[in-house]
Amino acid sequence: NQSQRRNTNGTAIGRMSGEVGDDRSTPDNENVSETPIVQAQPVVRTERGFVVPDGHGRPLDGSEPAEDVPALAIPLDSSRYRNCCENRACLYSFWGVVASFLIASFTIGFVTSKPWMGALGVLSIIPAVIILYLLYWRNHNSQVELPRVINMFCWGIVGAIPCAVIELLLTFAFGQITGIKTKDVEKGSRGESIENIVLYSLFAAFFVAALCEESLKYYLVVEFPNGIKDVPTAYGTVILSISGALGFATLENIGYVFQDSSTASIGVAVMRALLAVPLHAATGMIIGLNITGALMQREQPVAYKVLWLPILLHGTYDGLLMITLAIGTSTMQGIALLAFAIPLFAFAYGVRKICKLPVEYFGGEDNQRLLA
């Protein structure tokens, strides 16, 4: 008396006699021959049908469809195949570091009679937390595990250090080659000609800041060992890209906010919370969407196709602000308003693309393309 049930996705649940939960009864006077229970095997649904997976839950290369193989009644426990970076210890360590940083900020403020130092600590971290909550935890926390999101966030912080070293070396080399006093331009000094100011500002904005920082975000997702391996859904890749970008933005934010311990730093922290951090999140969002779009089309992501728009947005924003700071005329101050609109446009553009994603990006059989 065999039965077969299927769930809403059409995945075979099980095929055996006397299945648990079957409410159909068999008359006592009916002769029923005992049928041996068949051992169920895990299967993975692909475009070719159900195939036997390897040890990581991915379809075996060259395996033939096995529609007649009974499937397990419950999903495979993916926790057995988590890599070391998805360990809960990573999550606890992260929150421990955050708590220690905030306690240290308030303690330093109390000892130095500068109570706003604690507020600076909160303002330097809270933008990234809010953005991750809105784009991940609020509605999509099942797309990828929280420890893995925190892990990518931490690697974004770590990656900011060598990125800063490379940026300093490029800036130093540019100053030595051209003879432009880069420090004076960055501080808004009028010691250089307008041509030199514009030249250095564009170089620093596009080739130093934008190219280095956006390439780091791309590397974390595509090239880093634990980037997009075994991501359960396509949107999970986008979340990891955003998380890595926010990790970088948080450390950069801390550096800028604590450069000056005066009350003026509160204004810097607020402006960066409204502009710089959302811009980093937006470019990370666009990078993740471009990478995911290529993978869903069974194509390898190409760096220049993924990065051209983030670099353009980031470089334009930084360039306009640097030129405005160095020249300081009323005309340039008006142009600076255009720079303030770039992060808002970029963030709205990324969110709109996410809202228009097909449903298969958030789950379903098409996500097997990311794992195959």
Image (cartoon, grey):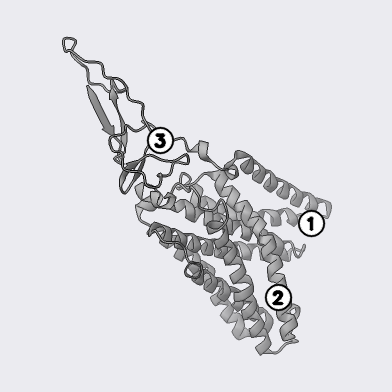
Q: Along the line of sight, which residue is nearer the eye, 290 or 62?
A: 62
Q: What residue appears at the point 64 percent right and 84 percent down from the top-left corner? A: 199
Q: Along the line of sight, which residue is nearer the eye, 170 or 321?
A: 170
Amino acid type of the residue that numbered disc 1 sits on in the rendered structure: Lys
Q: Along the line of sight, which residue is nearer the eye, 172 or 249?
A: 172
Q: Residue furthest left?
A: 29
Q: Which element is circle 2 on? A: helix
Which tag, 1 or 3, sits closer to the chain's start?
Answer: 3
Amino acid type of the residue that numbered disc 2 sits on in the rendered structure: Thr
Q: Is residue 13 above or below residue 285?
A: above
Q: Dividing the picture into quarters, in which one does residue 171 lie?
A: bottom right
On-image quarter of the N terminus: top left
Which tag, 1 or 2, sits closer to the chain's start?
Answer: 1
Amino acid type of the residue that numbered disc 3 sits on in the rendered structure: Pro
Q: What residue appears at the point 83 percent right and 55 percent down from the top-left corner? A: 112
Q: Is residue 365 above or below residue 16?
A: below
Q: On the image, numbered disc 3 is attached to which residue? A: 75
Q: Dividing the picture into quarters, in which one does residue 96 lie?
A: top right
Viewer-nearest of labels 1 and 2? Answer: 2
Q: Is residue 18 above or below residue 138?
A: above
Residue 338 x/y as whole percent: 54, 76
Label drawn at residue 171: 2
Label drawn at residue 114: 1
Judged left or right of residue 56, residue 269 is right
Query: Would residue 324 be visible to someone looking at this image?
Result: no
Residue 36 x/y as whole percent: 30, 20
